[in-house]
Image (spheres, grey):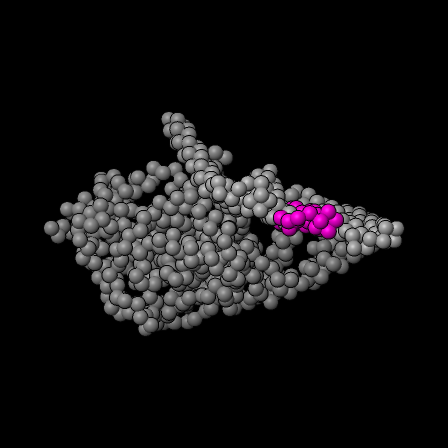
Amino acid sequence: MERRLNAELWDKMHYLFRDYNDRMVHVELTYDFRIDVEALRTVLICFFEKNPVFHASFTDNHVSPYWTVKPYRIDDVVHVREVTEAELPAAVDEFLTQCLPPEGDLQMQVMVFFHGEKTTLCIVENHMCMDGGDFKTFLSAFCKNYNDYVENGVSPLDFRVGSRSYETVYQSFSPQEQKAAKNLYRNINKKDTHAFPLTKSAKEDRSFIARRRISAETFLKIKSEGKKYGATINDMLTAAYFYSLYELAGFDPNESLTISSAIDLRRHVKDTEGMGMTNHTAWMQCEVPERGRDIFETLQYCTRSYARFKQDKYMGLHGLPLLSFGYKIMPLAVSEPIIKIGYSNPLIAMSNIGILDVKALALCGHEPVDGFMSGAVKYKPFVLLSVTSMRNEMTFSMCVRGNDEDKRIVERFFDLLEKNIGVLIGDAPAAE
Amino acid sequence: MDNVTAYLEASLAGVPASEALSQYKLKMTDVLSDRADELTHSGLRDQKVLMDLLKSEYPDLRADFEAAQTQPKKARGIEHGRLLGIACTAIYFIAVGILYVTVSLLTHRWSLTWLLPAAGVTLWLEWLFGLRIEKLVAKRRVFHPTARTLLAIGVLLLFLFAFLCSAFLFRMPRSWLLLLWGVIAMLLADAAFGLALREKLMILNILVYIPVLAALVFLVLGLHGILPWTPSWVLMPAALLLDLAIIAVRLLRHKKEETEQEVADAWSAD
């Protein structure tokens, strides 16, 4: 008999985002040994069996969408390729920029690139199934299960399973707080028409992932210099993002500008036990009233703006009941266009995915030597800057569907970002 | 297959041998073997992992067997109840049929006596709906809309029968207005039922029902000649004003709750 799974609120929301991005989440991890592919397949089968949404097909039936669990072969999920060091970057990019259709039977693809004695593990998964937060949890669980299986012969069944409902974010609240949170119908995010200066969309556009590595030395300086200004790493990066954008796009320095920053709603949950793999991400808007005389003034604006948001006990939960209400009372074919009108997808966004913990990601005692994670490939004019760090080395990545000119623009943006971070930490002189 | 049999034997060791146990073992051998085949087809080659995965999916076969043993008794009870229901329904309809034929033969008023079977069918449907509504209300909230729909149909059916009596038996003028009264009663019943069930967002239904009810009442009372058309049109704007008042009260109450929460937070922060 056909097995169906409920399409949860965030599944529907990320399905709606198909007009703004390709809904894929990407990760790349490099190890200095050849991993056991058979063990990897075994661990992944167990994960797929515990979380059937990864081998399910999404059905948009215009009334109430759902997932249908499909039979699969793990060989269609895990692929293996031998490449040379020279071939590797292009092969990785080609794999990571693929888009898995939600109507397909598989929502995750894994590629193992063997290059010499090293392995580069690349995974692409549908954002409708889980976000970066749970992807990190999945990777940690995957590595732990792989290690227990390979080293001790323990069956890899230790995966978190549970409800994928958006309402699990309320579970740690008191009944009174739950009532208050479930009444936050108002969407507090404002619309900002400023856009990243990319070229116009064209049929010839192709997906690409631009990356820039920031050294561990710079990362540690950002941390220590930030402390002097009472700013977090996120504040420092956002200030540099703002300043670089004003410079790159030539926005009027007196104009206000907004960058939306992704927040993990699991911050409201004390114990994630019983929560399934899903999405729990919302946007927090950081707004500067003007560019500021220098980047330090921009940093002050950012710190103040974030502080205002952080004071809110229900940070990120505003508007969720309204979305849920919209999907509940109307069929999908009606609710989607209405929600699209009310929902403003941020044109300029940032996702600080955070630390990729090398200890948690170690396979058989081999910590990953390199790696990053990034969000979906955005369609112009939308952009998302993803930030991850590993061994204190930070990776900026921006996934865009564009042309060579867009690549150059993004590279120029990364140059400016690096320069402005340099100014913030005192490594480079201020321009003015 | 051997592993599956061994797991079944180990799990059910100590359970007294019986025909039911043999049947359960056969059934579970098929279920577990099919699942093992499915996992093997997916590419799971490690038999130990495969068995551990199966065990995690079917962790307590003994409890499952014991639960399965009690189910046939329940199923038999349900089956007996269903058969009794069918027999009672058949007897009821035979009785209604006999009553209809007897009354018709005695009175020779065949043009009116058909109302008797109509009454019988209406009563039977109302009883059936009542039973179903009671069951649905006891279930999860997702079944409540079906219960509300059945209640609405039940109310409309009653008014349809009243209309038939009024039109054919009593030959009252404007009997068809009873159908409009039926719609009014249906909306009122649904609002009351929804509030009693504490349905989520019932207030939205009520906000829609108020102007619709006002328009219907205006129309029906006007057609009956009870209220003159001219001043009573005020009912409709009054209904909209009532809607606005309800919205305002709800917003104020919501605001008050928010403020109380903020105050509570401020206190607990200290």
- The answer to whether A398 appears left or right of B247 in the picture is left
What is the quadrant of the N terminus of chain B in the image? Answer: bottom right
Give x and y (percent) for residue B114.
78, 54
- The answer to whether A90 appears left or right of A60 in the picture is left
Q: Main secondary structure of the magenta part?
A: helix
Give x and y (percent) for residue B17.
82, 51
| Image vertical order of residue A51 relative to residue A70, above or below | above
The residue under the point 38% across, 55% down is A341
| Image vertical order of residue A76 relative to residue B152, above or below | below
What is the quadrant of the C terminus of chain B in the image? Answer: top left
Give x and y (percent) for residue A337.
42, 58
The residue under the point 70% across, 55% down is B7
- The answer to whether A8 appears left or right of B182 in the picture is left
The residue under the point 57% across, 64% down is A70
Determine if the magenta segment contains residue B154: yes
Give x and y (percent) for residue B194.
58, 42
The part of the chain drawn in magenta is B148-177
Q: Quadrant of residue A24?
A: bottom left
The residue under the point 37% across, 69% down is A94
Determine if the magenta segment contains residue A42: no
